[in-house]
Amino acid sequence: MLEIKDLHAGFDGAEILKGISLSIKKGEIHAIMGPNGSGKSTLAKVLSGHPSYQVTAGEISYEGENLLDMEAEERSLNGIFMGYQYPVEVPGVNNAEFLRMAYNARLVRQGKEELDPMDFDEILQKKMDDLGMEPKYKERNLNDGFSGGEKKKNETLQMALLEPKLAVLDETDSGLDIDALRVVANGVNKLINKDNALILITHYQRLLDYIQPHYVHVLSKGKIIKSGEKGLALELEAQGYDWLTKV
C-alpha cells in the first residue's frame, strides 16, 4: 500500500528526515516511536502533504501512484487520513456540517450523489453510537472548546465516517487520561481491518497496550535506527532510547 524509499525532507531549509525507508501493507499497524525531535511528526506531515514541509530526495508510492505528485486534498480524497496531535479549533463551523461536507466530498470523488442533512444524520448517529459518543458532538462547533480527550474522540469519529485506507495518527494519546485513552483506542481498533492500514506515532508504550502494532520502528535524528515487533516497544519502555541512540 505504501512504499517509502530513502526519503529526505525538512522544514524551512533544515533537513529533518535523512533517508527513511518503510513498507506498509494492507492490514498492518506500524508504530513509529522515538525521542523528541527525531522527525516523527515531520514524517506524518510529509505523508499528509503539509505545504510547509519540503521533500528534497526519495520516493513515496501509495497504491502504486506517486504520492508526492498529489496535493494534500488529493491525498485525502484518495483515502489518507491524518489525525493531528493538536486538532485545530474552528469556531463558527458546526461539527456535524463539517463532517457532512467531508463525507460528501468523498462520495463525489467516488462518483456518487451527495447526502442531504437528514440522510447523513442517520449515518453519523450510527457511527457515534458505535463509538459510544454523546449527541453534543453534533451540536457544537468543530473542536471549539473541546477538551483534549473530546478532540481525539472527534478525530476518531471523522476517521469512522471517512473510512480511510491509510490512517496516520500523530501522538493521538497526547493529553489523554487513562479513561479517554481507552475510549479512543477502542474506537480506532474498531476501524482497523484487513483492507486498511495504520501508522501510529507515539512516545509511549501505554497506547500500544490498547492498539497492538505488527511492527515498531524507532526513529532518531531523522533515520529509522531499529525495527521489530511489539516487544521492541516494551524494551523501550524499560530502557528508554539511550541504548539505541548512543551506540
Image (cartoon, rainbow, N blue to C red):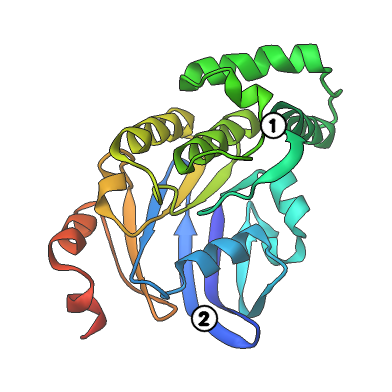
Amino acid type indicated by mark 2 = Ile
Closer to us: 179 or 190: 179
Q: Circle 2 sits in a helix, a strand or a loop, which is it?
A: strand
Q: Is residue 97 left or right of residue 198?
A: right
Q: Nearer the viewer, mark 2 or mark 1?
A: 1
Amino acid type indicated by mark 1 = Asn
Q: Circle 1 sits in a helix, a strand or a loop, which is it?
A: helix
Q: Residues within 10 Å of mark 2 (few under 14, many from 20)?
A: many
Q: Quadrant of residue 8?
A: bottom right
Residue 95 — which label? 1
Q: Is residue 119 left or right of residue 42?
A: right
- Is any part of residue 47 visible from this angle? yes
Residue 159's spot in the image, x, y percent?
58, 36
Closer to us: 195 or 116: 116
Sequence order check: which comes first, mark 2 or mark 1?
2
Whole-Å distance between the Cαs marked 2 and 1?
A: 34 Å
Residue 106's spot in the image, x, y percent?
76, 35
- Is any part of residue 78 visible from this angle? no
Q: Quadrant of residue 100?
A: top right
